[in-house]
Amino acid sequence: MGKLFSQANLQKIIVKFGKPGIYFWHAFAYRQLRGCWPDFKNPKNLSEMILSSMNKKDFLKYAYYADKWKVRKYIESKGLGDILLDVYGAWDNADDINFDVLPKKFALKPNNGSGGHFFCKDKSKIDIPTVRKQLNEAILIDGHIGYNFEPHYKKIQPKIYAEELIDTGTEAWPTDYKFTCVNGVIGDVFVCCERETGTTKYITLDTDWNILPYTKKEYMPDFIPEKPKHLDRMIEIAKILSADFDIVRVDLYEYKGKVYFSELTFSPWGGYMYSYNMEGLKRLGDFYYQTKKK
């Protein structure tokens, strides 16, 4: 968004103006993306609703559920322990990781964000000092400008955990099935594919696997991703895990003939939901009000 919103200038805005500066950034960034100012006082579309909520102290309650390590207990409390991938350990920083106890294949992930993952298919070929450096940088929160705009992540105590690697057997990454839920009801299935190409494609579908006109054309793949074999089970899981929240995205995988949990997301794409067009955001906003309990 230009030099005005470089990391250095954003840090100055935060230091000088605090929460009002963050509020302004959310509004300005939304305008840059959508071509109009958001209505945070009377939000109409789903992006406005999420961004408006992020500016409220109450949003911090989601830190526990957004913590990819702690949320495992929540998943188990819902009777869904079988959808959790195996874990091999957890550490406060990458310098403490004991690589000797890890299997040949594994994934290392920070618990407090959406990036910084390290996927290993052959432990004998990795440069351990480089991996440690990458992961330590990923869990740092004070220096990451984004955490000031998604405040619940800043409340998470950083940790790195080792998890079973979802190995497709090819260079392809596993397809993500992300269920956008409002008031415990599924609004769409947001599918992410072709991540390995460096240009991830996105498509939104309903639970009958029909395309919904919610995705900007430049983000869509040239094909409809294959319907997962266990879609009914995914739908059941998404309903269970979203029942306690107004707005949440339940992210799942299908692997080795089973459904596995990825994460709960309360601020998809920072709340801006870049790949969605305005029609999609408005429809999801209408759906929110239609399903809201009176």
Image (tube, grey):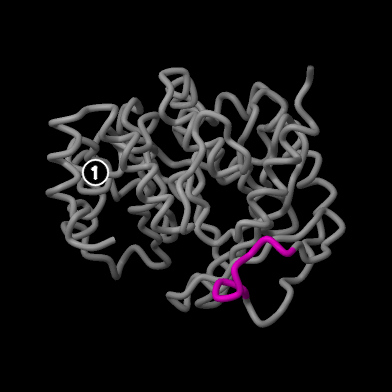
- Left/right placement of residue 97 relative to residue 259 reads left
Q: Is residue 217 magenta?
A: yes
Question: Where the C terminus falls, by quadrant?
Answer: top right
Residue beneath label 1, please? 145
Residue placed furthest toward the front = 36
Give coordinates of residue 160: x percent, y percent: 33, 40
The amino acid on which the numbered mark 1 sits, given as a three-letter code, is Ile
Give coordinates of residue 134: x percent, y percent: 23, 55
Task: Give above or below for 216 relative to 42.
Answer: below
Task: Give above or below for 72 relative to 181.
Answer: above
In which quadrant of the rendered view does residue 83 lie? top right
Q: Residue at x 43, y 55 (%)?
A: 106
Find the magenta span and give its range: 213-220
Tag 1, which secondary structure? helix
Give coordinates of residue 264: x percent, y percent: 56, 38
Q: Is residue 140 magenta?
A: no
Give coordinates of residue 132: x percent, y percent: 21, 51
| Pick the front one: 268 or 19 | 19
| Pick the front one: 229 or 112 | 112
Question: Where the N terminus falls, by quadrant?
Answer: bottom left
- Left/right placement of residue 5 relative to residue 165 reads left
Q: Residue at x 63, y 64 (%)?
A: 215
